[in-house]
Amino acid sequence: MVPPELVERCRQGDRFAFEELVRLTHRRVYSLAYRLVNDRSDAEDVAQEAYLRMFRGIAGFRQEAAFETWMHRIVTNCAMSHLRRRGRFGILLRDEEQPDLPTPDRAQELAVQRDELARGLAALPEGQRVTLLLKDVYGLSVREIATELGIEEGAVKVRVHRARKRLKEILEAEEVQEGSTRERSERGSGDLLPRRDAGGAGGPTSE
Amino acid sequence: MNVSLSCEEVRELLPEYAEPGPRPAGDVEVHLASCAACTAELAAYRDLLGGLAAYAEIEEEPPVGYLERTLGVVPRASRARAAIDELRDVSGRVATTVRKRPAVSAITGAAIGAAAIGLIAWRVGKRGRVPEIASS
């Protein structure tokens, strides 16, 4: 949470205050940028552009809304602009049914992160992922998302609906898979006969 | 007469129904009251939304040097600049005082002159010679 006094100092043109603001928020800004554009180098470009815009626009920021919301919208706007320049914005405009599977490199990165949610989000079609991030992770309203993505509010709601369903399915499937992997590794530890695990998820599964 | 909703119909509503906030009593509530499976589904969606809301607090690790590079892009505050600004501010106030009060300016000028003579004398004492005055 950025202290309102710091925001006010920035609004008054205090550059020391703005530097302090960057130090306070740089990880959060990077995180949002990265989750939207899915590339570490691009995320840094987006974050820097966002800070420049914040610097130029903060004098006009009215403190009726939370500063974080304003900051998230600027980062989102920069990310969308970036994706347009990279020619990937068309993907966001379409609500793809086919899963946009993570590349092997991305999957490896996520495996290192050991974040189930990150893996699940990365497995969503890009349009759904971005919309869900903005709505359920960063708390933008449907109207704000529609404005930033250049789509109708109804389309935002449909995407959020589909993304939630899809993500839940992905996470549940991963949980089942992890459970099966654990069972197999336990069985394979030298036993000749399959063992029934009393506390486990149950016997043979039929899928 | 209300027709009760099927599990399939209810589950289609659950992604939105799980959002926090008051919900009006209706057909979904009636169904959930007697369906453990759909109630479990609702709980799963609530867990998911809770996890997503908390995900914002989990920060990604930025590349090494990202903060420094970002600070380099933003117009930086300079402490030397701040000192210059402060001196200008002070000298501006002095100049205003001098314009308004000639007597004060005479006293101020004499005081500055005395201070300069004192400084030169101190330096002569330290170094044994008169310091060179650089021509501007």
Image (cartoon, rainbow, N blue to C red):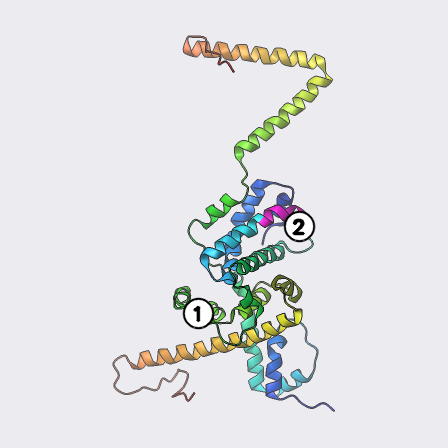
Magenta: main secondary structure = helix
Q: Mark 1: few, some, or many residues within 10 Å (few <14, many ≥20)?
A: some
Please name whichever residue, A100 or A114, is drawn nearer the observer in this view of the structure.
Answer: A100
Q: Residue at x 48, y 76 (%)?
A: A170
Q: Residue B75, image x and y in percent?
A: 55, 41
Residue B133 appears in the rendering: yes
Please tell me whether residue A21 is drawn above or below residue A78 in the rendered image: above
Reading the image, the residue beneath label 1 is A102
Residue B58 appears in the rendering: no
Callout 2 amino acid: Phe
Chain where mark 2 sits: A
Q: Where are the magenta residues, as a range?
A: A53-62
Asked where in the image residue A194 lies, by quadrant, the reply is bottom left
Is disc 2 in the same subunit as disc 1?
yes
- Left or right: A169 in relation to A194: right
Q: Residue at x 42, y 64 (%)?
A: A113
> Is residue B45 on the magenta stretch?
no
Q: Residue at x 66, y 69 (%)?
A: A153
Please name whichever residue, B64 or B39, is drawn nearer the observer in this view of the structure.
Answer: B64
Can you say which quadrant of the picture contains the N terminus of chain A?
bottom right
